[in-house]
Every structure is written in C-alpha cells, then in structure tokens.
Amino acid sequence: MRETNEQTATRKRGPAEASGGTVLLAARGICKSFGTRAHRVQALRDVDMDVREGECVAVIGGSGSGKTTLTRIMFGLDTADAGTVRYRGGLLAGPRSAVMRQLRLESGIVFQNPFTSLDPRWSAGRSIAEGLVVHAARSGRRHSAGGGEAIDAAVRGALAMVGLDPDEFIGRYPVDMSGGQAQRVAIARAMVAQPRIMLADEPMSAVDVSGRVQILDALTEIRRRQPHMAMVIVSHDLGVVQQLADRIVVLHDGRIEETGATGDLLANPQSAYTKQLIAAAAW
Amino acid sequence: MNRTDMAQDAMTQDVDAATRPQLATSGEILHVRDLSVQIADKTVLNDVTLDIGANERVGLIGASGSGKSMLVKAITGLLPRAARVDGDITMGGTQLQAGDDAAFAALRGRYVGLVFQNPGAALNPVLSVEQQVGLPLRLHYDLDAGERRDRVMTMLERVGLPASLAGSYPHELSGGQQQRAGIATALITSPRLIIADEPTTALDAIVQRSIIDLLVSLVESAGASMLFITHDFAVLSRATTRCMVIDRGRIIETGDTTALLRDPREPQTRSLVNAAKTLTLNVNPEHHHA
C-alpha cells in the first residue's frame, strides 16, 4: 500500500498526530490547477490529508499556498483534477452522489466574510433557521407539529452557544451587526444542525481584534460542547491556531510542507518555510 | 548635512524644484483642530485634535467603526457630500475648508500619498503597473513621457518590483506585488505625508512583514511622515513610534507606542491591548529564523 504524503511528513515529526479517532474525511493525491493552457498555475500537487473525528486541524500557509483550494475540494465545494476524497469511507463522486449528500448534511461551513456569506435581507434568526429547515427536509426528517417552536429553540441555542443574546440578535439584520457579531451568526448557522465536521475558512480575517477574540471564544466553546465534532480551520493567524488546533498542516506552493501536533510544530518547526512563517507571525 | 537634509535633497532630486508646485514649508506636516464630522445626524468624529510633525510615524488604532477610516477621509477630503464638517485641517501650511475639492485634490497624490487596505480594489484594473504608478506624476507634474517612465522604473526598483512587471495589470500580480505597486504609486511624487490605511490586512504574515519593512524604510529614507492606521498591534509596534487611540470618534489616548501598548491608561485601550495579546502567537521568535 502506498504511503501517503501526510504520513511521510508526519513520521518526520513523530507519532503524536498519527493517533486519534476515526478518519472522517480523507484526501489522497489531490491535484488542482487553474488558468489557461499558456498560463497554468498548479495550486495543489499530490496532496494527502486526513481529518479525524473530534480533532481540530489547522491548515496554514502563505497566500496562494493552496489552503482554500484544498479544503474546498475536501468539502465538495470544488473538484480536483486528480485524486480522491472519501467521507466516512465513501467516495465523493460528483455533486449528486449519496456520499456528497451525506457530507452536505453532516458538515457546516463558515466563510471568510460574513457580510457576503449572510443574506443582507434576512434576519439572523431566519439565516440560522434556513440551514435547519433545509437539513431536515433533505434528511427526510420533519419537525413535529410544534416544528416552529423546535426550530426557534434550536436557533436560540445556536446563538447562545456563540455568545450572542438570542432575544437581541434573532431579529437583527447583518447591517446592524459588527464584523465579529455577523461572523458569530454565520458560525451559529453552520452549527445549528449539529454537524459532524465543520470547515472555517479564514473566519477572523475580516474582523478587528475584539471581534477575533469573540470568534475565538465561540469556536472554543463549540469544541468544548461538541467534543466529537471535527473542525478544519484555514488561517494565517497563528495565535488563533495555537489556541484552537490540535494539529497543523503547513501548505506551501501547493504541497504539504510539514504537519504535526500544534505545540510540537510551533516549538520545533522542521522546514525553513515553517520557521519563516512562525518568525513572521511572532514579531 | 544631517539625515533630514539628505532626505530632503533626495526628494528634490526625485521631483525637481522646477516642477514641484510651491507649498508652504513648516515643521508640522498636519494640524487637525477640533474636527467633528456628522453624517445623517450621526457623529462619526468628535472634537479630534492631532498633529503630525516632520519625520514622525504615528499610529492610529481603534475597533471597527471607531472612526479611523473616517478620519483619513476627512483629512484627505474624501468624505461623502452629505457629511457636516466643523474644525480646522491644515496640511503643508494650507488651511483646508470642507468641500473645497480643488484644494484637497491638489494635495492628494502630491503632498499626501495614500496606501489602501485592499490593493486589488485600490488599483485601477485597466491600468498597467507603469501607468498606475505614473498617474500621480501625470496629474501633478509636467514631465515628458521618457522622464516619467524613468522615474516610474526607479520607483519600481525601490519597492522591489521587477521591471518585467511594468506592463502587467493588477489581476496578474500577487497580493504582495499589488501592494508594492500601491506603495510605489503613493511614493512616486515624494510626498511629505504617507497615510497607510490598514495596508497589510489582506496579506499573509510573511508578505505583511516585508511590506511593513519596505514602507517604513522608504518613508524614512524619503524624510517623510506617516499616519498608519491598523488594528494589528504587532504591525503597529514595528511601524510607528507614537500612537493615538480612537474610540467612538474621539481620540481617547495618545503616547509613545511601546509605552502605550505596555501600560494603556484608558479602559477601551486596555480592552484592545488585551484582545491583541490573546491573539498573539506565544513562541520565541529567536528559535524560528530559517
């Protein structure tokens, strides 16, 4: 059996991150390029990555390193030129495949800019509830006769989990929120259906320091309350990664540069690029 | 000849005296007195008073919505028409009246250079790098095309952009290259004041560091002053020597950057500093130099 790239890199760092729960999401040999035939940019080169139940994996790297492309492919938002993605052992084989439907039902995604990912004409309550309604319909479950009340309770619970007062925010529109508040509403929307796995793609880059702390607190609380949920966070904010992630995957020029347990990798980076990344963030 | 004189001499070589419009000379680069701005009955700036002296690099920090960008817009005459402005702004010895678009336009790009947050959006998508960087020279100085090109190519070299990118358009550049083009555009006329409004927010840590170092070294070598807006305190301490804290449109604290970050007086400043500390990577950077 072929040894994966991630295993190769991991072995150099020791066995700490190799152990853990069941693999939920597994990417193997992912390649992706963009552009025209004359100007081809190779975004990902034969990348392998696993995400296990209950762990938080941070994908870090410079702009253009392939972080967002890799995670979009792993969560079925984009397709690879080559390679495979498996969710709970099943192959993601196109947008209509059963495995893709299962991944969509069981995953929550938080995008970079809450003001473009939230519908400006919908209140926070409606945005959060929509995910719940869609998930219930697709999974064949229907809320009972008191469905409206059940949805309302779930929405309020999700708002409270991200540190927002439900009474204050359930009817509020994005235009009346700060960046940190809007992103926490987006996190509540991703969390309301209690996903098995969550992707947060640069969730703090569009907000100020106070908002970043609020989002960090919300994500920390989510991890505490839902210890079995897996989380993938794309970030170049290493201070946040240090506090949130169990494991770090460093991408550089479309390849996995290094991977390891968070504390170990930040204290003893092996590659020159990772050292440079940490030195730049630590000033 | 002292350092400032040498820098001034270098500036004069960049845009020679014959083509430089006359400006009043003064040790103070920017005076703002009792500046208040209201938009739709909302007070966005409240009694702001500040000075920036020659060769000073001053930071302006505050939470989102505190008035940082509004202050920049007020100083550079870019407020919306509906804004009601009270107070005095004096730049380069010229007292500016709100609504006097011609006076502000005469200073923008010449006396004051602007570096914006998102270079991808700030650069004109239909202008090549050479056209973009040369635009302030075209607008403010009477140079022939050859002379303008020479100055642009010199500036591209200074900001670390290869000459081969002169004909490239913004979408063909990386984020870091775009911001280098933005810095070149801001500095091409050797302005006395650079206003940088969160210029590295959209960039990764490695590029961010190189852009800050570049900006500081170019501002220093030109003998210019800088107003640096940020909510990244690591960037603040690297780029500035003095800083001001703005909260709900009012300057609430000002002081030496290092001292202010170490010992903030006002509760709002303490809250910002504590938040920044929470997000700071806790490793020894000495161990990580490649």
Image (cartoon, coloured by chain):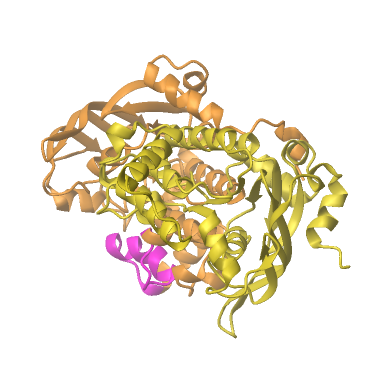
Look at 28% across and 63% down and name the residue there: B139
Q: Which chain is orange?
A: B
Residue A95 in the figure: left or right of residue A43: left
Q: Is residue B255 visible?
A: no
**Considering the image in quadrants, where does the C terminus of chain A appear?**
top right
Chain shown in yellow: A
The vertical placement of B136 against B51, above or below, is below
Can you give x and y, in whole percent of width and height, for residue B134 in the image? Answer: 39, 65
Does any portion of residue B153 appear in the rendered image?
yes
Q: Is residue B141 magenta?
A: yes
In-image side of A86 versus B226 (left or right): right
Residue at the (60%, 59%) spot, across then down: A71
Magenta-span inclusion, residue B166: no
Is residue B121 or residue A113 the one in the foreground? A113
Highlighted magenta segment, given as a residue range: B122-145
Identify which residue is drawn at 77% across, 52% down.
Answer: A258
Q: Quadrant of the N terminus of chain A?
A: bottom right
